[in-house]
Amino acid sequence: MPSMLDAVVVGAGPNGLTAAAELARRGFAVEVFEAGETVGGGARTEELTLPGFRHDPCSAVHPLGIGSPAFGAMPLAKHGLEWLQPPLALAHPFPDGSAAVLTRSVGETAMSLGPQDAGAYRRLLAPFIGHWDTLAQDFLRTPWDGLPRDPYRWARFGFDAIQPATLLSRRFRGEKAKGIFAGLAAHAIAPTSGLATGGIALLFALAAHENGWPVPRGGSQAISDALASYLREQGGIIRTGTEVRRLDELPPARAYIFDTSPTALARIAGLGNAYRDYRYGASCFKIDYALSGPVPWTAEEARRAGTVHIGPTAGEIDTALRAAVTGRDPSVPFLITAQPSLTDPSRAPEGKQVFWVYGHVPAGWEGDATDVIERQLERFAPGFRDIVLARAVTGPPQLAVRNANYVDGDIACGAFSGLQTVIRPRLARVPYATAHPSVYICSSATPPGPGVHGMSGHHAAKAVWRRLRESGPSGRR
């Protein structure tokens, strides 16, 4: 009779793979079960449009991935992960053909905002520049996990981070600084007046200055493949094409870790209404393009940027997000776009480009936002439609089918609103633990939240290995 496993992980997204790898490298016997035919979750790469065009269906650019303490502790480069940096991390164009930019240089970024705001931007970032390692450790964590490594900077950053982006950006006077800051905050998929949206903007800005906003060579799948390769090297087993509907379908184990939504976890593990108060947020309408050439941006800076935000003003960005959150159809969407083949030519046939864009729409929205998205693109890249060879359109229902964690198309696996912004998936000393003593959750519904950084998996694994260590060895390894 086979020995009991130490841990079973359900879901082979970056968090599930990180949790499994963290346990396997500490000598625990681990198996991963994934419903899809390949690993990846929100970090995949596929030919969605035409042969030779390699698209990222979900995440594409990874400022938190390259700076992740969890990823940094694993030899992922030896398993094929190579980061590629675009000339500019981010461009935020304006109708007059100018653009604010986010680069590795704080000075270059500050000057792009105009003389009236350059000093204010420098002062906002100055206390934190050069301290990414401790800030990342302290803020990509939960309070239960001991004291912060740098209490002074943690408190100082926290004071700014808890503020709404609209409040924090009052120190800026011009539209360029306010616009780029609102665009950074909008990654929370919540109105920029929401709690802690200022922290989202600060974190992304700091990440750019410290580590850049890179893409992985070959696409986001390279992150997942590297994690999977490292896990197998440590003795972990991955079983793809295996959907889990009930806990008793899994092999006996001392712990079960779910890289799933709280809703799916409750259903599979028989936890009833344990997460009945957990709320999901607005969704996205995503288009992947095969293009005959580079996007014809009016702003020269946008032609060199890995990521381009299309707002342009803080007011327009907040209006677009508010419409999505309150269930209104998109009219003038805020767009987050990525140009990975500018940095990684292997992603498209020679001379061609892949282009990635999404705008915000209500949860479960069944409309077609293609026209409003392309009208917005044409404002800043006249003639864009003329270079489209093919497009793959994905609305909220299709997002939910593609990735079961995206409930009603919510790519953040939970709304950033109210207390749920800082307390998710429920109030608990150890948010990765559940009412079942052997069941844990490690998805982006847990702290520190969305993003391809593996930190939710890292913290869940830490909670599990502490418990397994206390209960003694299983005897298998």
Image: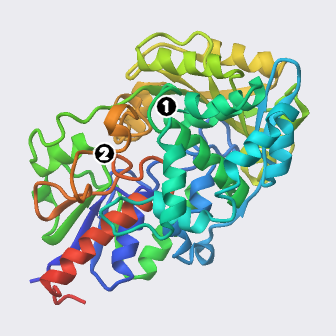
Inspect this view and state whether residue 348 appears: no
Q: Is residue 249 left or right of residue 348?
A: left
The percent position of residue 352, horizontal first and vertical second, equals 81, 39
Placement of the C terminus among the 4 image quadrants: bottom left
Tell me which amino acid carries mark 1: Ile
The percent position of residue 441, horizontal first and vertical second, equals 26, 55
Placement of the N terminus among the 4 image quadrants: bottom left
Tell me the number on the disc at residue 189.
Answer: 1
Image quarter for residue 187?
A: top right
Q: Is mark 2 on a helix, strand or loop?
A: loop
> How many residues crowd mark 1 within 10 Å: few (<14), some (14–19), many (20+)?
many
Q: In this view, does 278 lie to the left or right of 50?
A: left
Q: Which residue was labeled with disc 2?
A: 424
At 75% from the left and 28% from the top, the residue drawn is: 389
The percent position of residue 74, horizontal first and vertical second, equals 52, 76
Tell me which amino acid carries mark 2: Arg
